Image: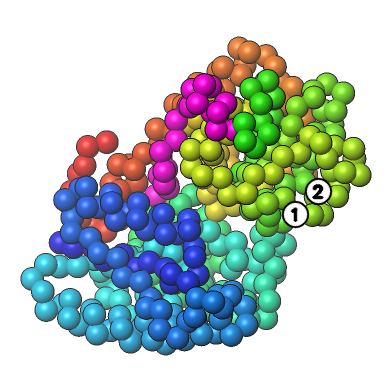
Amino acid sequence: MQIILIGNYKLDKQESMERFTLMLSDGFENSGINTKIWRPTVFFGLKRLNPYKGLGKYLGYIDKWIVFPMILKFRIIGNSKKVSPTFYHICDHSNAPYLKHLPKQNSGITCHDVLAIRGAFGFKDAYCPATKMGKILQKWILKNLSKANKMACVSEHTLFQLKELSNSEFEHTKDWRVVHNAFNAPFSPMPSTTYTKLLKPYGIQSNNEFVLHVGSSLPRKNRKLLIDMLKELENTWDGYVCFAGEILEQELLDYAKDLGLSDRVISIKRPEHDTLVGLFSACKAFVFPSLSEGFGWPVIEAQACGAPVIASNLKPMPEVSGGAAIHADPLNPKLFADAFIKLKNHTFRNELVKSGFENIGRFSNQRMIQGYLDLFGLNKKIKL
C-alpha cells in the first residue's frame, strides 16, 4: 500500500496546511507506509504577483483548477499500473474539487473548518464575509466536499456544521468521522533562564508579567477583547498584553492609546518557534477569545507549555481544551478579566495547568495517524 497526499499550491503560502501535510507524510512514513505528496504545479502563476487578488489570483486558478486536474488524470493512470494499491488523500478541504478526479473508493479528504463556506451562505457567526466570487467558490467547494466517501473532520463541531450544511446530500453510508489534529511542532515548558534571554530583545524583561494572544488579525480572532480586558484589570494588575503573530493593526494601537494603555501593549511579528514556546512558557495566561474556529491549535500549544488558558466558550474551544481551561463569553471582557483574577489562586492555577498537561495526550501524532489509517481502512496498528 502507498498513500499519496494532495497538498496545496505553493504560491498560496498556506503555512499551516503545509505543516499539516508534512505531519501526515512523516507519520505515515514512520508507520512503514510509502508516502508521496502531489501538489498543483506552478505553471502560469508568478511569484511576484499577489496570489489572493487580481491577476495573480486568476493565474493561480488556472494552475489549480485547469492544469492540475489534467496532470492528476495522467498521474493516476500511471500509478494504477503499479503493483502497490494506492489511497489518495486531500489534505485541505478547500481542494475538494479534486475529489472528482480521484478513485472514489480509494480517496479521502480532511475538513479543517467550514468557516468560509458558512460565510458564503451568509452565517454571521462565521465572521468570514465572502465576496461574490468567494460565494461561488465556496459553494463549489461544498458541493464537491459533500460527495466525499471518506472524510476526517478535525473537531466534532466542524463535523456537525458540515453535516448541517450538507444535510440534503449526506448519506449515512459515508464514513465521515472526527480525527483530531496533532501538534505540528514540538511544544513543552521552556526553562526560565532560556526564555528570559529569548524574550529580552522584544522588551519583555524577567520581571514583566504579561498575558499572551497568538493569531492573525482576522476579525474572528477578536484581539480587541484583550485590550478591553487589560482596561478592566487596570487597577488590579500592571502587566502587559503581548500579541504574537500578525503585527497588531493600527486601529487597535490607536484604541489602546485612547485608553491610555499603549505602553502596556507589545506586538511580536511572526516569532520563531523557540520564541513562541518561550512566550507560552513565560506568560501568566494564554488568552484566546476567538469568535469562530475549526479547531484552535494555540489552545493545546499553550497547555503543552504549562500556560493556564482562558478561552472563548464557543465551540470547539471547550472540546479542544478538554475542560482544562477557563471558558467565558468572548464578547464580555469583564468575564475574561475575572477569569484572570481567579488564576491568582495558586492551587486553582496549578490544577488547571496539570489538567492541561493531561489533556494534550489526546493530540499525539500517533493517535492522529492511527485515526487516519482506520479511516483509510488499512488493517495496521501503531504503538500509541
The stretch of residues the image draws in magenta is: 179-199
User: Does residue 22 appear left or right of residue 326 in this picture?
Assistant: left
Quadrant (top left, top right, bottom left, bottom right) of the N terminus? bottom left
Relative depth, front residue between 294 and 353 = 353
Q: Residues within 10 Å of mark 1 (few under 14, many from 20)?
A: few
Residue identified by numbered label 1: 249
Could one spot residue 230 in this view of the protein?
Answer: yes
Amino acid under disc 2: Leu
Measuring from the top left, give residue 40's x and y in whole percent.
Answer: 38, 76
Q: Is residue 187 above or below residue 34?
A: above
Measuring from the top left, give residue 129's x and y in whole percent.
Answer: 70, 68
Residues at marks 2 and 1, CA–CA distance in whole angstroms: 7 Å
Q: Is residue 332 above or below residue 94?
A: above
User: Does residue 100 appear left or right of residue 191 in this picture?
Assistant: left
Residue sitting at 10 percent across and 74 percent down? 82
Could one spot residue 137 in this view of the protein?
Answer: no
Residue identified by numbered label 2: 253
